Image (spheres, helix red, strand yellow):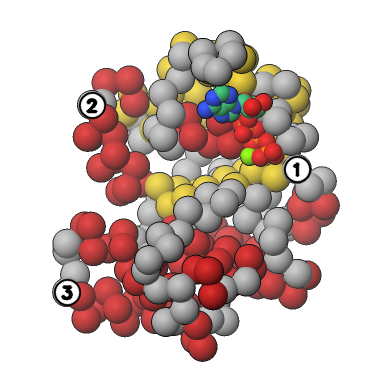
Amino acid sequence: MGAQIVLKNVWKIFEKPKKFTALQDVSLEINPGEFVLILGPTGSGKTTLLNVMAGIERSSRGTVIIENRNLADLSEETLAEFRRRNFGIVFQFFNLLPHLTALENVMVPLLVEKELSIKRIRQKAIKLLEELGLAEKLYHYPRELSGGEQQRVAIARAIISDPKIIIGDEPIAHLDEESARIVLDIFRRLNREGRTIIIATTHEALVRMLQDALTKVVRLRNGRIANIRVLRRR
Ligand SMILES: Nc1ncnc2c1ncn2[C@@H]1O[C@H](COP(=O)(O)OP(=O)(O)OP(=O)(O)O)[C@@H](O)[C@H]1O
Ligand SMILES: [Mg+2]
């Protein structure tokens, strides 16, 4: 037992188009129910760190253990399934499917799991989108939505399957103050319900905006952990 996420001496070296070390000797532990902020300037390796953590990218060196499973031991197929089951990811650039409506985009993760009827999945997706203030936009395609609206659709898609770990890569970058508050409150609520939340951002202001909820602030610089501040224990 113990930590839910363990990174031990993790390196990520991109070979193409030019050799570049994006993560250097990163070690980090995250317990179930933590709310972690990963802060760092653009290019410091935040997205790379999240990708390695969620098994979207394999580390070049070091160990990544999630829920007591060493990701290196999982085949590509098992890893994809493992990721679907454990992680909800709000991507920095949303990655919404352009030919599906907002509602359909949110339904996708549960359609893949094939455990609920389409009717139930639809109800669940509509409820989530309503909570996120998008009741009027269910049948809009991504290109017919503002950046902030696309962001909220991406959040709904990330949380619809009740993942244990929710990752947000710059989750409020495209939002005005009011929508940002709504989104941060959603992350807070998900965290209070017991989910682990990991948010990456360049914005120092989030430390203050989330100070009531954060357990750790991790500062990245040039692919290295510069500092880990523990605010409360879980
Ligand atoms: N697939 C890739 N191939 C080569 N280099 C990459 C790749 N992905 C990222 N990098 C490089 O790794 C570095 C870190 O990128 P990363 O996207 O992790 O930064 P970031 O901290 O998320 O930045 P931002 O705040 O702009 O999103 C960058 O210099 C980037 O060019
Ligand atoms: Mg990034």
Q: Which labelled disc corresponds to residue 105?
A: none
Identify the disc placed on residue 75.
Answer: 2
Left/right placement of residue 154 relative to residue 43 reads: left
* Ligand 1 within 8 Å of the CB at mark 2: no
User: In screen coordinates, is 87 left or right of 12?
Assistant: left
Point out which mark residue 117 bears: 3
> What residue would you read off at disc 1?
202
At mark 2, the secondary structure is loop
- Name the residue type under label 2: Ser
- Amino acid, disc 3: Ser
Task: Specify whether tag 1 is near ligand 1 (CB below 8 Å).
Answer: yes
| Mark 1 residue element | loop
Residue that sits furthest to the bottom in the current view: 136
Quick check: marks 2 and 1 in contact, CB under 8 Å?
no
Which quarter shows the N terminus?
top left
Q: CA distance from mark 2 to mark 1?
A: 33 Å
26 up-or-down from 192: above or below: above
Residue 93 in picture, x, y percent from top left: 57, 51
Mark 1 vs 3, N-terminal side: 3
**Which of the pair 132/15 is nearer the observer?**
15
Badge 1 density bin: few <14, some 14–19, many ≥20, Cα 10 Å: some
Asked which quadrant contains residue 229, the reply is top right
Foreground pick, 12 / 207: 12
Graded by Cα atoms within 10 Å as few (under 14), some (14 to 19) or many (20 or more), the crowding at tag 3 reads: few
**Is 179 left or right of 78, judged from the image as shown?**
right
**In the drawing, does residue 43 fall left or right of residue 98?**
right
Image-quarter location of ligand 2:
top right
**Pick the front one: 24 or 164:** 24
